[in-house]
Image: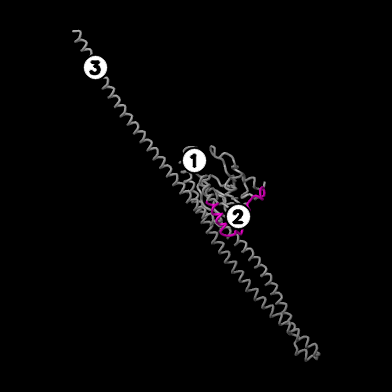
Amino acid sequence: MRDMIKHLNQTIHASALCTGVFLCLSFSASSVASGQNLLDGVKQEISRQQNQLDNRQQKFDSLQKELKQQELGISQTAKKIHLADNQLSMLKTSIAQLEREQKKLEQLQLGQQEMLKELLNAQYRQGKNSQLSNLLSGEQSNELDRMTVYAERLSQARSQALNQLAATDTELQLKYHQLKQQREQQQIVLAQLNTEKSALESKQTTRKKTLKSIKGQISSSNQYLNELQNNEKRLVTEIAKAKAAAEAAAKAAANKAPMDGLARHKRKLPWPVKGSVLHSYGTTQQGELRWKGMVIAQSSGSQVKSIYSGKVVFADWLRGYGLMMVIDHGKGDMSFYGYNQTLLKKVGDNVRANEPIALVGDSGGQERSALYFEIRRKGAPTNPKSWLIK
């Protein structure tokens, strides 16, 4: 009996043990399945987030391309306006000169007409004292000869006066015609200028919308810092290309402009534009990123001038810097001019110190018009203010 009870207890214990193992195995399998589902869900979420990031980046890049095209369009229009303004200025000067010449010719014409009147009166009076009347009155031959010579000279003077008057009339008519043409051209250029200004305003409005969309895509300071860092990398890449191009050009042919570098001109160079400094070299731009140049405030359309003679090695739109110009001054020294509205020089052009090279703007997505100015020596940025006249 006791053995039977023992065997029953063993059977019950074994049965319970088997049930527990089954339950454990079932629970373990369920946990694994649940974990796998969770892992799959995480992977799907990561994939979704990555797709969102990719789509956002693509949209951001697309907006940057739109901004580039819009700012290049603004640049072309601004250049047309600049050229039209110069043409109007030249026409104004030319018209003023023609008006002065016209007045001089009119005064000369009046003087010649008065002289001709006097000559005609003198000839008329001399005619009344003719050779025949002198002969009949018994005048001596010497007196007759003198009067004859006087009459001939009087006739010559009258003829010369008539020729001069005719020449003055012709020249005066030419001035009238030139003035008319110049004034008509002035009206045409004015009309073109007004059309281009309207086009510029329209393009600037479109640009503002794009710029607003771009800002909407930057949702954190980290994203903004990342964009700034990428912009700086692009600039460094372009610097390397520009440096290589400058070295190749120097080897290929002699440059007409002095390429002696900036070393001897520290604190003697003119400012590229006059204005207040918005950002100084070395100050914080974002996070640990610092300004490699300086930003000088100035109204849109103001002239940007080269600080020293050299050769243009880069003149194009660069993300973050807008329309940028880089001038090689020789011996590894380069100056950079960014945020421009338009560029007045192209790659390969020689420039002189204080020569206009661009117009101030807000390209590159800037909120206000200013000039980004930087100096690099052998590729390394240096404080540009220490090179300029105080």
| Residues tagged 2 and 3 counted as in contact (Cβ below 8 A) | no
Camera-side residue of 339 and 113: 339
Of the residues under marks 2 and 1, which one precedes in the sequence? 1
CA separation, marks 2 and 1? 33 Å
Residue at (43%, 44%) from the top-left corner? Answer: 59
Q: Nearer the viewer, residue 379 or 92?
A: 379
Label 3, on which residue? 14
In the drawing, what numbered circle is on residue 226?
1
Which numbered marker is on residue 96?
none
Could you tell me residue 181's position as x and y percent?
Answer: 57, 66
- Amino acid tagged 3: Ala
Q: Earlier in the sequence, mark 3 or mark 1?
A: 3
Residue 313 pos. (x, y %): 55, 54
Residue type beneath disc 1: Asn
Mark 2 or 3 closer to N-term?
3
Part of the protein shown in magenta? 241-268
Using the image as rendered, state which of residue 364 and residue 384 is in the foreground.
384
